[in-house]
Image: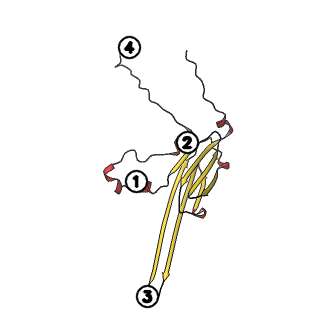
């Protein structure tokens, strides 16, 4: 006879898609009352918004970075990661007979995304337009042809 208290196995839903390893969460355990003093939280607040879409032939990534110019970005792929850095510095100086006024601003961010093994590194394309940095990532042929496998129930 089977006893429910003996050897009970719990089934947990697990579903991983190729892009799910693009994200890592450092915020799994935090004190919500102390977020303004948390350096990690403050850093995350300044990171640009990110959208990732999977399509039949690849992935599209959109990163919101308004106020930057194309020349402000440095993008590369190293060790299976898409690395995005942006730095913008602005200086203004106004001189008059009685005063000198100087203004400056600095804005930067860094973002690294772990790419799935199904992406062809050599075919990654980037375009910056209207404050959005867009990436197009092509899938390898074997990744495109994969279809769900039907499992026969006996």
**Nearest to N terminus: mark 2 or mark 4:** 4
Q: Which mark is residue 96?
A: none
Q: Which residue is mark 3?
A: 98
Q: Nearer the viewer, residue 76 or 128?
A: 128
Circle 2 sits in a helix, a strand or a loop, which is it? Answer: helix
Q: Quadrant of the C terminus?
A: top right
**Nearest to N terminus: mark 1 or mark 4:** 4
- The residue positioned 58% from the left and 58% from the top of the image is 130
Q: Nearer the viewer, residue 145 or 60?
A: 60
**Nearest to N terminus: mark 1 or mark 2:** 2
Residue 23 lies, in percent from the top left, at 50, 45
Residues tagged 2 and 4 counted as in contact (Cβ below 8 A)? no
Give the CA distance from mark 1 to mark 4: 49 Å
Q: Which residue is mark 1?
A: 41
Q: Which residue is mark 4?
A: 2
Q: Which residue is mark 2?
A: 19
Give the CA distance from mark 4 to mark 3: 92 Å
Residues tagged 1 and 4 counted as in contact (Cβ below 8 A)? no
Compared to residue 32, the image places residue 7 above or below, namely above
**Nearest to N terminus: mark 4 or mark 3:** 4
Alpha-carbon neighbours of circle 2 within 10 Å: few (<14), some, or many (≥20)?
some
For discs 1 and 4, the disc positioned in front in the rendered view:
1
Residue 149 lies, in percent from the top left, at 60, 26
């Amino acid at each position: 006879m089977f006893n429910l208290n003996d050897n009970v196995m719990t089934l947990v839903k697990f579903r991983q898609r190729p892009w799910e390893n693009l994200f890592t969460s450092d915020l799994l355990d935090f004190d919500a009352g102390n977020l303004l003093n948390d350096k990690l939280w403050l850093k995350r607040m300044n990171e640009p918004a990110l959208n990732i879409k999977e399509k039949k032939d690849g992935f599209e990534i959109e990163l919101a970075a308004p106020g930057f110019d194309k020349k402000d970005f440095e993008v590369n792929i190293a060790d299976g990661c898409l690395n995005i850095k942006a730095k913008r510095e602005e200086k203004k100086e106004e001189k008059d007979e009685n005063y000198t006024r100087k203004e400056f601003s600095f804005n930067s961010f860094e973002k690294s995304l772990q790419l799935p093994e199904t992406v062809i590194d050599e075919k990654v394309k980037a375009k910056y337009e209207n404050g959005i940095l867009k990436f197009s990532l092509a899938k390898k042929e074997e990744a495109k042809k994969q279809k769900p496998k039907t499992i026969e129930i006996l």
